[in-house]
Image (cartoon, coloured by chain):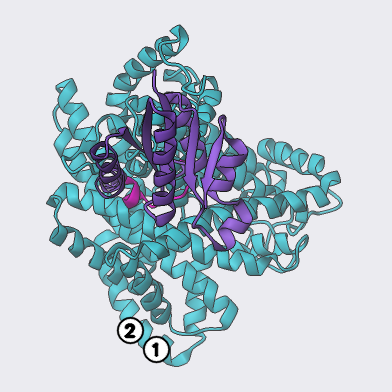
Chain colours: A cyan, B purple
């Protein structure tokens, strides 16, 4: 998940401000839009991101973590019990050879991952570690492990209650399982919740899944080539996205879908190389992570500060409980919906436990964060809000600087990766938004075209302006999806448990067996 | 029990040559059944967009239908019209691996394929389907030039 780091926003603002002519023109437009949006959306944003009284802990993060814990306990630690089985499913061991040519478990997982792995793993982790210290990593891993159960629950339901149309296409996601599931259980309000979810999903898709991505991509590009008006980036991105989602130019999407996983592998590979070079410091880094998790090692807020940052980053990064992944996973071809649930639980593991942890380890080992040699604690920056860094960098710049200590050329690769991740996230979210849109307004070429055109227009707006309130509102919408989705999941989880019992007993009895045997 | 020959078609002229060779073999063998196979190259480990996934089932049906109506069914009809015993099969998968699996499943004595018409970088890097089939097949393979 790509959550806006205020630092990035600041960087983008600074970039715009550096161009006096553009800044003047943009400011007037920005101000108008900002004021209008802030007036209408401020209370909603404040409600979603409101902290618990007397703390800086947003209740929405607790909402996601509590849900993940409840699902973990309710399904008896399904993420550990069926972990091996999930790997076997992805490998295709249980796939019917006669279904060759259909969407495989691997493909559904890879597609969902391309929507979640991205800027959150690169910039977001740096923000978390930069504020909460290395100890944030421990809580991030814990939240990631728990989040696996949330994904399992929502993705099982996504496949179970998807719509299959006569032409063979499928539509699935929380809006479908909420309305159908509530109907099956005889509960009222299913349709209302589904509509509410769809509204939030459309807003989230246009904001966090679109404008924020365009905004960050522009900030990244202007960081390399120098400042220039954001609308140019916006038009280019919108043109390419338009060609893919409206023009059906599959070759662009195909290239991206192939390059993005490659970038992900390259990123993890580079992190591993740096860890291998510094193998003697790995033990020390883990020591810092464990010590920081329970003492804070001098960061603002101490242990609680580290915990908040870790939980927050994991929740923002892997989208477990948000419901977006259920849309992506519902396309798989299987007679057993729960198998996709097992596969989907690998998503937070890859996104948060592996990739986010890699970033955190590299940042810690690079020693870009300044430690007081006398106390062993981290030194706070001047504002006292985060850890002081060597070149006073934060966010993606901190990640970049940390990787550069081991591989000097890596920042260039990272810049390309950020742009590609932004693009692939836009493509993914254009689909999530579209599914919510068609749920509200019906399937049809004209209806779909209207949404796709709106989506492309928002790319230009997102890249051209630094509309803080708009982006805040969009992110709030993504987490509002989680409010609706998790509320519904508490009612629907017994349906998943019935599936789990049935499947587990058939697996044990040998009724379900490997096809490769 | 007739001797079975599996013919791998690719919709190109090389497939035609393989088919003609199979007819000659069938004539020499006598009691022989020709199984015509067309494999649509596909891997479960590729990366696709969410929209492609949602439409995948529909696309698969279209691909199977095209392969049947354009390649396999005409070939089978031609063989039957000429007095041979013939059947057809269309599958998705890795061409070499799937042809071998079909041959094993139907109990074919031999696989007949045309010389690969693939070329370029991919072939140099990963080898052609024909080359892979020759290397990994569980039964004799005849490659018709």
Exactly how many numbered labels are in the figure?
A: 2
Which residue matches tag 1? A24
Secondary structure that dominates the magenta span = loop
Residue lying at 75% horizontally and 62% vertically, measured from the top left:
A407
Q: Position of residue A241 (x, y in %)?
A: 35, 67
Residue A4 visible? The answer is no
Which residue matches tag 2? A28
Marks 2 and 1 close (CB-CB < 8 Å): yes
Q: Nearer the viewer, residue A439 or A71?
A: A439
Image quadrant containing the N terminus of chain B: top left
In the picture shown, does residue A315 fall above or below A388?
A: above
Q: Position of residue A485 (x, y in %)?
A: 30, 37
- Inspect the magenta stretch and tell me whether residue B49 lies in it: yes
Q: Residues within 10 Å of mark 1 (few under 14, many from 20)?
A: few
Q: Say which quarter of the image contains residue A425.
A: bottom left
User: The magenta stretch spans which residues?
Assistant: B44-53
Q: Which chain is mark 2 on?
A: A
- Inspect the magenta stretch and tell me whether residue A196 lies in it: no
Farthest-out residue, top: A509
Q: Which mark is residue A105?
A: none
Q: Nearer the viewer, residue A488 or A505?
A: A505
Q: CA distance from mark 2 to mark 1?
A: 7 Å
Q: Is residue A102 left or right of residue A182?
A: right
């Amino acid at each position: 998940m790509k959550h806006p780091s205020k630092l990035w926003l600041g960087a983008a603002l600074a970039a715009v401000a550096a161009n006096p002519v553009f800044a003047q023109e943009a400011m007037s437009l920005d101000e108008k839009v900002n004021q209008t949006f802030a007036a209408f959306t401020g209370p909603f944003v404040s409600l979603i991101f409101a902290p618990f009284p007397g703390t800086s802990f947003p209740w929405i993060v607790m909402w996601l973590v509590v849900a993940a814990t409840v699902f973990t306990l309710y399904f008896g630690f399904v993420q550990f019990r069926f972990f091996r089985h999930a790997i076997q499913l992805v490998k295709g061991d249980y796939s019917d050879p006669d279904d060759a040519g259909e969407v495989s478990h691997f493909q559904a997982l890879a597609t969902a991952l391309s929507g979640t792995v991205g800027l959150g793993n690169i910039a977001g982790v740096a923000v978390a570690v930069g504020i909460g210290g290395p100890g944030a990593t421990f809580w991030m891993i814990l939240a990631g492990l728990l989040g696996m159960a949330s994904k399992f629950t929502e993705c099982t339901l996504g496949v179970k209650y998807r719509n299959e149309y006569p032409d063979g296409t499928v539509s699935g996601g929380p809006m479908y399982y909420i309305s159908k599931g509530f109907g099956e259980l005889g509960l009222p309000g299913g349709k209302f919740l589904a509509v509410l979810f769809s509204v939030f999903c459309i807003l989230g898709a246009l904001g966090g899944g679109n404008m924020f991505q365009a905004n960050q991509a522009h900030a990244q590009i202007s960081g390399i080539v120098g400042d220039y008006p954001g609308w140019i980036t916006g038009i280019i991105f919108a043109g390419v996205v338009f060609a893919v989602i409206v023009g059906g130019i599959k070759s662009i999407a195909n290239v991206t879908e192939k390059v993005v996983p490659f970038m992900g592998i390259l990123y993890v590979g580079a992190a591993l190389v740096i860890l291998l070079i510094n193998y003697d410091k790995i033990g020390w880094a883990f020591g810092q992570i464990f010590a920081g998790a329970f003492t804070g090692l001098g960061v603002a807020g101490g242990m609680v500060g580290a915990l908040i940052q870790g939980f927050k980053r994991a929740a923002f990064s892997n989208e477990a409980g948000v419901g977006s992944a259920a849309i992506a996973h519902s396309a798989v071809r299987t007679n057993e919906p729960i198998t996709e649930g097992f596969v989907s639980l690998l998503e937070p593991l890859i996104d948060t436990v592996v990739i986010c942890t890699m970033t955190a380890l590299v940042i810690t080992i690079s020693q870009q964060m300044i430690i007081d040699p006398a106390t062993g604690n981290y030194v706070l920056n001047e504002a006292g809000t985060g850890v002081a860094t060597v070149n006073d960098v934060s966010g993606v710049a901190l990640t970049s600087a940390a990787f550069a200590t081991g591989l000097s050329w890596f920042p260039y690769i990272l810049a390309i990766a950020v742009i590609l991740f932004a693009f692939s996230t836009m493509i993914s979210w254009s689909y999530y938004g579209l599914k919510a849109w068609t749920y509200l307004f019906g399937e049809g070429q004209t209806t779909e075209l209207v949404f796709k055109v709106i989506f492309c227009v928002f790319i230009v707006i997102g890249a051209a302006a630094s509309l803080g309130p708009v982006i805040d509102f969009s992110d709030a919408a993504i987490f509002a999806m989680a409010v609706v989705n998790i509320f519904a999941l508490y009612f629907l989880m017994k349906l998943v448990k019935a599936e789990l019992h049935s499947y587990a007993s058939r697996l044990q009895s040998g009724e379900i067996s490997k096809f490769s045997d | 029990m007739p001797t079975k020959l599996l013919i791998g078609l690719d919709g190109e002229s090389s497939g035609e040559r393989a088919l003609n060779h199979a007819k000659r073999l069938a004539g020499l063998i006598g009691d022989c059944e020709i199984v015509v196979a067309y494999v649509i190259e596909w891997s479960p480990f590729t990366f696709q967009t969410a929209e492609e996934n949602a439409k995948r089932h529909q696309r698969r049906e279209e691909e199977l239908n095209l392969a049947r109506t354009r390649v396999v069914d005409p070939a089978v009809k031609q063989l039957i019209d000429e007095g041979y015993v013939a059947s057809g099969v269309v599958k998705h998968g890795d061409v070499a691996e799937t042809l071998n699996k079909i041959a094993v499943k139907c109990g074919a004595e031999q696989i007949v394929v045309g010389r690969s018409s693939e070329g370029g970088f991919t072939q140099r890097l990963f080898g052609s389907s024909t080359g892979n089939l020759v290397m990994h097949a569980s039964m004799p393979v005849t490659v018709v030039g």
